[in-house]
Amino acid sequence: DAGVTQSPTHLIKTRGQQVTLRCSPKSGHDTVSWYQQALGQGPQFIFQYYEEEERQRGNFPDRFSGHQFPNYSSELNVNALLLGDSALYLCASRVGGSGVTQYFGPGTRLLVL
Amino acid sequence: AQRVTQPEKLLSVFKGAPVELKCNYSYSGSPELFWYVQYSRQRLQLLLRHISRESIKGFTADLNKGETSFHLKKPFAQEEDSAMYYCALRDFGNEKLTFGTGTRLTIIP
């Protein structure tokens, strides 16, 4: 089991563009969360998906949206990119239910020029 | 609003010396506290959680609700402990993990 996988590993975009990041959860996991980690900061919670629905959302604008597919994989979409969106985007997965460990992926590094 | 503070961005400790990574939090509910670690070129992974009250790789952390702290300790540092450490908080029944800004621990041989 490769664990949580994310693609692409790196991405360069320009202001105003749109980007889609992808995440495949660890085998057997059905819940996916997305985090943004700016340089020198800890990860910040964007949102969580379970049963193909957004279950909880952090303090991020509507430009950030997501999707979960029937196979539990997930996408993070960011529209109208800003320079401040440059960050490492982390995906974490776990089995549904409370109090269970989340497993993080390696992240996608997004640079907005 | 919940907040996690890690006052030290960098911490250097000699091999064999005790280690203490500080974490303070502000939250009015019943938080669940975690320590995550990221070794060089590896992904973020859970080190320990306060509910488990266990020792992982020689590290322990005790939740002090009076001082709102969850400091990470190890009596004798090892070179392989060099890594980035993040303290995180989650409300019971909630998904959102709130992370501190992290402490980079370097063990000096």
Image (tube, rainbow, N blue to C red):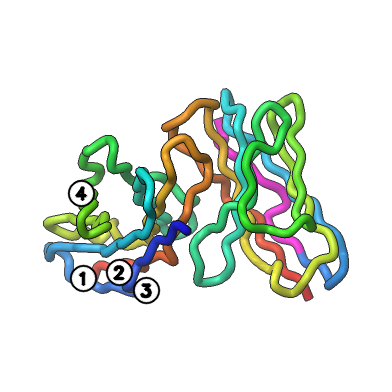
The reply to whether label 1 and label 3 mark residues of one chain is yes
Residue at x 69%, y 38% (from the top left corner): A54
- Across the whole image, how many numbered discs are drawn on residues? 4
Three-letter residue code for mark 3: Lys
**Magenta segment:** A1-11
Q: Amino acid at mark 4?
A: Asp
Q: Are labels 2 and 3 on one chain?
A: yes
Identify the amino acid type marked 2. Answer: Thr
Say what secondary structure mark 4 lies in: loop
Where is mark 2, residue-wise? B106
> Is disc 2 in contact with disc 1, using a CB cutoff of under 8 Å?
yes
The Cα–Cα distance between marks 4 and 1, rounded to whole angstroms, is 21 Å
Whole-percent x and y of residue A29?
Answer: 57, 28
Return the residue at label 4. Answer: B62
Asked if marks 4 and 3 fall on the same chain, the answer is: yes
Chain bearing tag 2 is: B
Q: Earlier in the sequence, mark 2 or mark 1?
A: 1
Q: Residue at x 53, y 27 (%)?
A: A95
**Are circles 2 and 4 on residues that touch, CB within 8 Å?**
no
Discs 4/3, front: 4
